[in-house]
Image (spheres, helix red, strand yellow):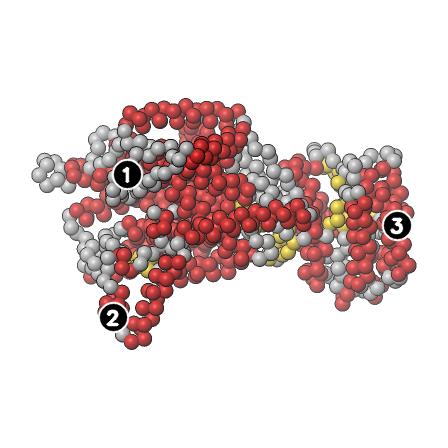
């Protein structure tokens, strides 16, 4: 089966396999001369790519890449030295104006409340010159943003927060001399209360008052060596940082400071590094060097007013670096991976690992016994309107197939854990620019057009078209997430429409299936629920996250259950009843469906306009275990309310379409417009106008709150406009993009997997597999991510055939066993519940 999978970046079968006319006939029919050769080259090029670059080969390459990357990152940690704390303090780059990115880790932006919590009952001391005073002010402004810089120059300054007993002092010691040493001695000998954090640095005054003489530099080394002894003693009970000197802008320095050259600054920094590194070589210095602020200043010192003192935004970088270094290991923010240790696996994570290891051991035993041969089942497509039947009857499946699937899943979950729960790979924060969002969109649009094929059927919203729709929407959402485009309101609002469109399809697809097939059996319901939830439930265990954290799956699961309950409850109304011309009163069945939809609308409005009632319903245990995030259902309320009408819009659209189709009002033949020429042109015109009008409104909207209030009522306009534009012209319904359709078939897996193996820190950052090269990194991580998502879709299908038997009695027994396991899981999760870090 895998050998016959389509190309990873295309998934288009060879032209002859599609049942269409021969390649040369088609090219000859549509073009001549050079155009014919171009089309021939185009088609042969796609076929050549498909032949050599199969999904099986892609997965083998991605597996080899993962192994190599794990070895590389592990070796670099072990032999290269330098943990995330050191990288935070020493290396980084600007992503954009005032946005600092430490090398390979994420820096949390601390707020006042967090910083007070971190520094409660602590004393922090800054020692140094006017530059250290600037750093002191930036530091205390994190704690108290309204703090003014009103202290006297060349004097000590004190800051205190009485409510949390935070004390931060600046002590004026402009030179690294005996005076500074005596202050340190008073702390180490116990004469004064020892600070919990010491930040110090000095050099420019020594350069200025001694005109940069070599003798002064040598004395600086001697003094610093003596000071280092006391700093090492302080480091027994405190965090100690030596701040390397930032560069100066020599062109705007005053005459009295002209001797403070960058050459002199570099010599003094080299001296400091040599002194503290010498201690590291002799036994390990615990004095940490803060060099990140110097690196940041190298790019912004030209903005300095006097050439010596840095712009406020630049010194804020140093203050935030310090706060991350001090607080990340205590508060453990999810988007602060710098200088943070990872929590040990909990009981549920250990049990999950035990299950995967046990499956591998059992499979090994089967292999030794020679019982490892089995036929891989052809999975039914529970989301389509027709079940895919295997060409030949498959032999009953033994234990080998599910064991193999669990082993593959165990290997994949190990990769998930290494990416987002272990300190193996690096992580970096997102930063939005228009180019990082729109340029990839152009790339995928070109690929989507390149891989265009003729459809097998030309009905409105046929399966190939809906797969294409889900595919390009998912790719846009992925680019939206990785680029941090939620910061740009027009993009945010358009992506909100895409999420609503997924729910619209949920209503449309499930209503159409039940209306046409009338299959309300337990088997199909369990199949759908299993496919929707299997990956998320495994991730809840392995990644220690609540079910609601993966909000989209609870959302579509909830709406599937609502649709099923609404249509399965008496009276069950099916197309064969409603459209029967010979059954008396058949027209009333349509009113019955509309009455059900009206009751659903009333149900939605009741919940939407009574938040208290909504929260009381979903806060009842054990329901709350599925819908709470950080002990509250507020996030579930927000997600549910935002697209509350999308599903019922999809159901109503499906009813209208299927009724019109049955009454032969629509023209769905190949090349035919959906309606008459006048109606088609009118609807197309209205659709284009509506589409543009919505985009103008989304671009002019002022705040997310304002936009989100209107979104549930008007998102359907954009969705219907797209459907009509895509389907009214006959030629548009006759083609589709196999590139987008391939991604559409694994859109659910792509959406969920991105949380941990493409993005990082639970979507707050970006996974870094290739450090130092963002473009190559995103290509490699995307390649692996897509291969993993596709493999998980196969594993889910394999397990669904084994876990969900068609026999109702066997299925009920398994549901009982699953219910007991779920109850045990919920009890364990309740006993070990804790807030999601950094949420």
Between marks 1 and 3 in the image, the one whose residue lies nearer the viewer: 1
Position of 697 compared to 255: left or right?
left
Q: Which numbered disc flags the more N-terminal residue, 2 or 1?
A: 2
Q: List the single residue furthest toward the bottom.
A: 33
Residue 822 at x, y percent in the picture: 43, 27
Spatial CA span between label 2 and label 1: 43 Å
Between marks 2 and 1 in the image, the one whose residue lies nearer the viewer: 1
Write down the residue under mark 3.
Answer: 223
Position of 18 compared to 205: left or right?
left
> In front: 323, or 345?
345
Q: Give the quadrant of residue 578.
A: top left
Write down the residue under mark 2.
Answer: 28
Is residue 519 positioned above or below 258 on the image?
Answer: above
> In front: 611, or 756?
756
Is residue 791 positioned above or below 25 on the image?
Answer: above
Q: At 37% from the left edge and 48% from the top edge, which residue is drawn? A: 2
Spatial CA span between label 1 and label 3: 82 Å
Write down the residue under mark 1.
Answer: 394
Spatial CA span between label 3 and label 2: 87 Å
Identify the element where label 1 is drawn: loop
Position of 839 compared to 385: left or right?
right
Residue 455 at x, y percent in the picture: 27, 56
Is residue 488 positioned above or below 30 on the image?
Answer: above
Q: Give the quadrant of residue 335.
A: top right
Q: Residues within 10 Å of mark 1 (few under 14, many from 20)?
A: few
Q: At 44% from the left edge and 56% from the top edge, which residue is drawn? A: 699
Residue 232 at x, y percent in the picture: 81, 41
Q: At 61% from the left edge and 50% from the top edge, which residue is drawn? A: 104
Identify the element where label 3 is drawn: helix
Q: Are marks 3 and 2 in contact (CB under 8 Å)?
A: no
């Amino acid at each position: 089966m895998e050998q016959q999978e389509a190309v990873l970046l295309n998934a288009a079968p060879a032209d002859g396999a599609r049942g269409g006319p021969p390649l040369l006939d088609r090219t000859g029919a549509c073009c001549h001369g050079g155009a014919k050769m171009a089309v021939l080259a185009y088609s042969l090029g796609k076929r050549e790519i498909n032949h050599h670059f199969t999904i099986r080969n892609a997965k083998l390459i991605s597996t080899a890449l993962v192994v190599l990357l794990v070895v590389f990152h592990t070796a670099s940690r072990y032999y290269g030295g330098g943990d995330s704390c050191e990288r935070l303090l020493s290396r980084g780059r600007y992503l954009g104006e005032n946005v600092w990115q430490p090398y390979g880790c994420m820096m949390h932006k601390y707020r006042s409340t967090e910083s007070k919590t971190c520094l409660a009952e602590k004393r922090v001391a800054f020692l140094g010159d006017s530059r250290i005073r600037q750093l002191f002010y930036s530091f205390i402004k994190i704690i108290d943003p309204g703090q003014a810089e009103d202290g006297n120059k060349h004097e000590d300054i004190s800051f205190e927060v009485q409510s949390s007993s935070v004390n931060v002092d600046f002590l004026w010691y402009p030179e690294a001399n005996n005076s500074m040493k005596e202050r340190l001695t008073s702390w180490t000998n116990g004469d004064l209360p020892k600070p919990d954090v010491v930040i110090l640095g000095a050099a420019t005054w020594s350069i200025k008052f001694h005109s940069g003489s070599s003798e002064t530099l040598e004395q600086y080394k001697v003094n610093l060596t003596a000071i280092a002894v006391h700093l090492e003693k302080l480091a027994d009970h405190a965090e100690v940082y030596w701040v390397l000197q930032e560069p100066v802008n020599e062109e705007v320095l005053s005459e009295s400071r002209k001797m403070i050259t960058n050459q002199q600054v570099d010599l003094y920094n080299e001296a400091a590094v040599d002194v503290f590194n010498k201690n590291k070589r002799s036994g390990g210095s615990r004095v940490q060097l803060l060099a990140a602020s110097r690196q940041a200043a190298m790019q912004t010192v030209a903005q300095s007013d006097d050439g010596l003192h840095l712009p406020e935004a630049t010194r804020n970088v140093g203050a935030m670096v310090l706060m991350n270094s001090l607080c990340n290991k205590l508060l453990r923010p999810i988007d602060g991976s710098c200088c943070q240790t990872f929590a040990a696996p909990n009981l549920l994570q250990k049990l999950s690992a035990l299950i995967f290891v046990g499956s591998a051991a059992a499979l090994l035993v089967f292999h030794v016994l020679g019982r490892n041969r089995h036929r891989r089942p052809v999975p039914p497509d529970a989301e389509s309107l027709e079940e895919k039947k295997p060409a030949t009857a498959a032999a009953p499946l033994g234990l080998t197939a599910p064991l193999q699937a669990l082993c593959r899943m165990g290997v994949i979950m190990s990769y998930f854990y290494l990416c987002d729960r272990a300190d193996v790979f690096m992580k970096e924060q997102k930063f939005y620019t228009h180019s990082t969002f729109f340029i990839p969109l152009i790339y995928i649009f070109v690929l989507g057009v390149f891989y265009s094929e003729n459809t097998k059927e030309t009905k409105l919203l046929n399966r190939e078209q809906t797969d294409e729709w889900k595919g390009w929407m998912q790719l846009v959402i992925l680019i939206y997430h990785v680029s941090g485009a939620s910061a740009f309101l027009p993009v945010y609002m358009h992506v909100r429409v895409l999420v609503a469109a997924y729910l619209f399809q949920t209503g449309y697809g499930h209503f159409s299936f039940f209306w046409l097939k009338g299959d309300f059996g337990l088997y199909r319901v369990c199949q759908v629920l299993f496919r929707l939830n299997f990956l998320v439930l495994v991730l809840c265990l392995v990644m220690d996250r609540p079910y609601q954290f993966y909000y989209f799956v609870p959302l579509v699961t909830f709406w599937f259950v609502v649709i099923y309950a609404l249509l399965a409850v008496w009276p069950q109304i099916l197309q064969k009843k409603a459209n029967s011309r010979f059954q008396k009163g058949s027209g009333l069945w349509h009113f019955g469906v509309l009455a059900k939809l009206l009751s659903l609308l009333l149900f939605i409005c009741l919940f939407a306009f009574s938040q208290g009632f909504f929260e009381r319903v979903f806060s009842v245990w054990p329901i709350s275990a599925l819908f709470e995030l950080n002990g509250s259902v507020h996030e579930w309320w927000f997600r549910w309310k935002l697209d509350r009408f999308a599903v019922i819009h999809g159901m109503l659209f499906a009813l209208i379409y299927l009724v019109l189709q049955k009454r032969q009002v629509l023209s769905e033949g190949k090349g035919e417009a959906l309606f008459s020429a006048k109606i088609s042109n009118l609807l197309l015109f209205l659709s284009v106008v509506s589409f543009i009008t919505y985009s103008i409104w989304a671009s002019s909207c002022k705040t997310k709150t304002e936009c989100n209030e209107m979104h549930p009522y008007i998102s359907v306009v954009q969705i219907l406009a797209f459907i009509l534009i895509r389907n009214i012209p006959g030629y548009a319904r006759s083609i589709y993009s196999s590139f987008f359709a391939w991604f559409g078939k694994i859109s659910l897996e792509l959406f969920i997997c991105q949380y941990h193996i493409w993005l990082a820190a639970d979507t707050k950052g970006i996974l870094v597999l290739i450090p130092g090269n963002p473009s190559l990194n995103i290509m490699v991580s995307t390649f692996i991510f897509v291969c993993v998502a596709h493999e998980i879709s196969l594993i889910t299908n394999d397990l669904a055939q084994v876990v969900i038997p068609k026999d109702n009695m066997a299925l009920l027994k398994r549901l009982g066993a699953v219910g007991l396991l779920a109850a045990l899981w919920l009890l364990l999760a309740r006993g070990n519940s804790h807030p999601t870090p950094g949420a």
